[in-house]
Amino acid sequence: MWLVTTSVAAVGATVGNLVLPKDYKLGFLALMLWGAAAMILIDHILGYEGGAFLEKTTDGMIGNSVVLGIVMLLPVFAIWGISLIISNLKGR
């Protein structure tokens, strides 16, 4: 399900990039999210051993795959926020 959460975030960022002002640099956010979604999809395809393609549970520290997807999005949003701060500081 972390593939789904990342893909939904990527679609949201892409739509936001088309609708909202360019000041928010949503194109950069969408690029990072689509890259993450592509990497997760390739990981799923290469690691597929039969059974459910989209799993609802994981064997790792975070058992819920939706929560894992959200946790995976946090660094992406943090990098995007830092890039916004840096670009605003340079613009002054």
Image: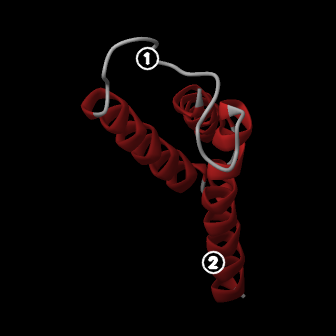
Label 2 Cα neighbours within 10 Å, binned few <14 / some 14-19 / many ≥20: few
Using the image as rendered, state which of residue 88 and residue 9 is in the foreground.
Answer: 9
Q: Residue at x 48, y 52 (%)?
A: 32
Q: Which residue is mark 2?
A: 87
Tell me where residue 50 appears, x and y as whole percent. 33, 14
Tag 2–tag 1 contact (CB < 8 Å): no
Q: Residue at x 51, y 56 (%)?
A: 28
| Image position of 59 with respect to 61: above or below | above
**Which image quarter: residue 15?**
top right
Label 1 Cα neighbours within 10 Å, binned few <14 / some 14-19 / many ≥20: few
Mark positioned earlier in the residue sequence (2 or 1): 1
- Foreground label between 2 and 1: 1
**Measured Cα–Cα span from mark 2 to mark 1:** 40 Å
Q: Residue at x 42, y 39 (%)?
A: 40
Q: Which residue is mark 1?
A: 53
Secondary structure under the numbered disc 1 in the rendered image: loop
